[in-house]
Amino acid sequence: NELQQAPLMLDVLADTGVPVFILLNRMTQEQRIGFAASGGDLSQIVGSIVTDNEVAGYDMAMSLIQEARSKGLDADGISLMALLGDAATPAALEREAGLRRALQEHPDVNLIRAFPVMWSAATAYERTQTALQRNDLDAVWAANAQIALGARAAALASGKTPGPRVLASGRQI
């Protein structure tokens, strides 16, 4: 349901008797209400496995902040750029909420920019490369591992060594 397509998939499977197990993103309350109101049968959903994305976003941010402090990158505050998954899906919004919670707890961390990169390593690469030319970044928070790898590649291409000078964090699930 990452792209909010679960109701469409349930419609397609409606008369097949195939049980549906949802992975990573449950249907939103609005989807459930709309689907049921249109005569859809939610009983074909037998279960789901969903990551706590808010906690994932928070944990990634806290890991970056702690690592930046351990490397002494916090002398004048920590400059952080965020590469968001997108601006609409529950996973992206929840991960961003976790990041923002960590930032509220650590006012010395300066969020330079937050860009939605549509879950794309190539877009993350472009955004990171541009940001590194314009800003002195200490850390890049990435919504997932693929995005973090794009940011890492951009840091290397810009002559920055990931780890000692620019940190990146991303989690796949």
Image (tube, helix red, strand yellow):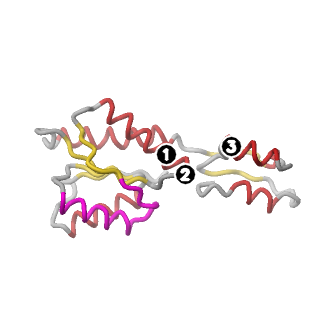
Q: Position of residue 5 (x, y in %)?
A: 67, 58
Residue 156, how many percent across, how many down?
Answer: 21, 66
Q: Quadrant of residue 9?
A: bottom right
Judged left or right of residue 87, residue 7 is right
Amino acid beneath label 2: Thr
The residue tagged 3 is: 30
Query: Residue reaching furthest top?
Result: 105
Measured as percent of width and height from the top left, residue 55 is found at 45, 37
Amino acid type of the residue tagged 3 in the rendering: Glu
Q: CA distance from mark 2 to mark 1?
A: 6 Å
Q: Residue furthest left?
A: 75
Task: Give the main secondary structure of the magenta stretch.
Answer: helix
Q: Earlier in the sequence, mark 1 or mark 3?
A: 3
| Side of 163 where 142 appears, left or right | right
Residue 121 counted in the magenta span: yes
Residue 147 percent location from the top left of the image:
38, 60
The residue carrying pointer 3 sits among few (fewer than 14), some (14 to 19) or many (20 or more) residues within 10 Å by Cα, namely: few
**Callout 1, which amino acid?**
Leu
Mark 3: which secondary structure? Answer: helix
Seen in the picture, residue 109 relative to 117 is either above or below; the reply is above
Quadrant in the rendering for residue 151: bottom left
Instruction: Categorize mark 1 by other alpha carbons within 10 Å: few (<14), some (14-19), many (20+).
Output: some
Q: Residues within 10 Å of mark 2 (few under 14, many from 20)?
A: some
Of circles 1 and 3, the one toward us is 3
Determine the CA span between mark 1 and mark 3: 16 Å
Q: Are marks 2 and 1 in contact (CB under 8 Å)?
A: yes
Which stretch appears magenta? 115-134
Which mark, residue 89? Answer: 2
Tag of residue 93: 1
Secondary structure at numbered mark 2? loop
